[in-house]
Image (cartoon, helix red, strand yellow):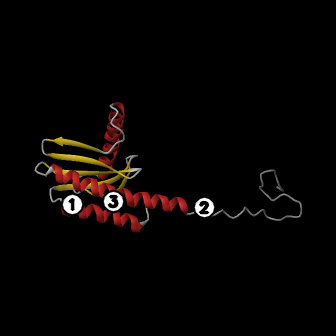
């Protein structure tokens, strides 16, 4: 789980990105496993978008690998009414942006790449910090207390008792 301060920094980055590129209609940071990290996606289900991003990422990674073009960097889908752009964000996350059809695609890529790098730095640093901290151990339950008797079984005990 991402600490609140790191989560707030990722959300701030998404909001600043939407300010820099007014044609953006949404921004989502997600793990490559399809789980939402942070989002600013009004009108779009972030969980569904994260899951679809993970599925498309799997295909994009395989396509880049099969063609000898190296590791995944970005994916752009153009629909009739806009764009969906996904950028690598560190070792274990991606940044997915939703944009109107009239967006300047060069600007989208420039800002998306920068924001992806920043989000990746934040998430990778949080992950490294989590690894440095000793794991939290769950509290041990108190040992069961066995009632003391003078060698006689208690009434109703598992092995019998006085009737």
Residue 108 showing in the rendered view = yes
Residue at disc 2, secondary structure? loop
Residue drawn at point x = 36 percent, y = 38 percent:
70
Residue 18's disc number: 1
Q: Nearer the viewer, residue 147 or 26?
A: 26
Residue 138's disc number: 2
Q: Nearer the viewer, residue 50 or 120?
A: 120
Give yes or no for contact between labels 2 and 3 (Cβ–Cβ under 8 Å).
Answer: no
Image coordinates of residue 102 in percent, x first then y, are 10, 50
**For the residue carrying disc 1, how many other residues have a C-alpha within 10 Å: few (<14), some (14-19), or many (20+)?**
many
Report which residue position mark 3 lands on: 118
Q: Separation of disc 1 and disc 3 at Cα? A: 14 Å
Residue at the bottom extreme of this rendering: 5
Q: Nearer the viewer, residue 132 or 1?
A: 132
**Relative to 54, does residue 133 appear above or below in the rendering?**
below
**Relative to 159, does residue 68 appear above or below in the rendering?**
above
Residue drawn at point x = 85 percent, y = 64 percent:
149
Image coordinates of residue 79 in percent, x first then y, are 16, 41
């Amino acid at each position: 789980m991402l600490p609140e301060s790191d989560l707030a920094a990722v959300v701030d980055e998404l909001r600043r990105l939407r300010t820099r590129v007014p044609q953006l209609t949404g921004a989502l940071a997600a793990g490559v496993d399809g789980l939402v990290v942070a989002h600013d996606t009004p009108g779009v289900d972030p969980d569904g978008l994260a899951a679809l991003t993970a599925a498309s990422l799997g295909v994009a990674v395989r396509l880049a690998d099969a063609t000898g073009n190296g590791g995944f960097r970005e994916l752009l889908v153009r629909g009739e009414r806009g764009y969906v752009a996904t950028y690598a964000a560190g070792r274990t996350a991606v940044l997915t942006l939703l944009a109107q059809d009239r967006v300047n695609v060069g600007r989208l890529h420039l800002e998306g790449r920068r924001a992806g790098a920043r989000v990746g730095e934040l998430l990778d640093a949080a992950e490294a910090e989590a690894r440095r901290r000793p794991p939290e151990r769950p509290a041990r339950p108190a040992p069961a207390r066995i009632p003391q008797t003078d060698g006689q079984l208690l009434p109703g005990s598992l092995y019998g008792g006085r009737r």
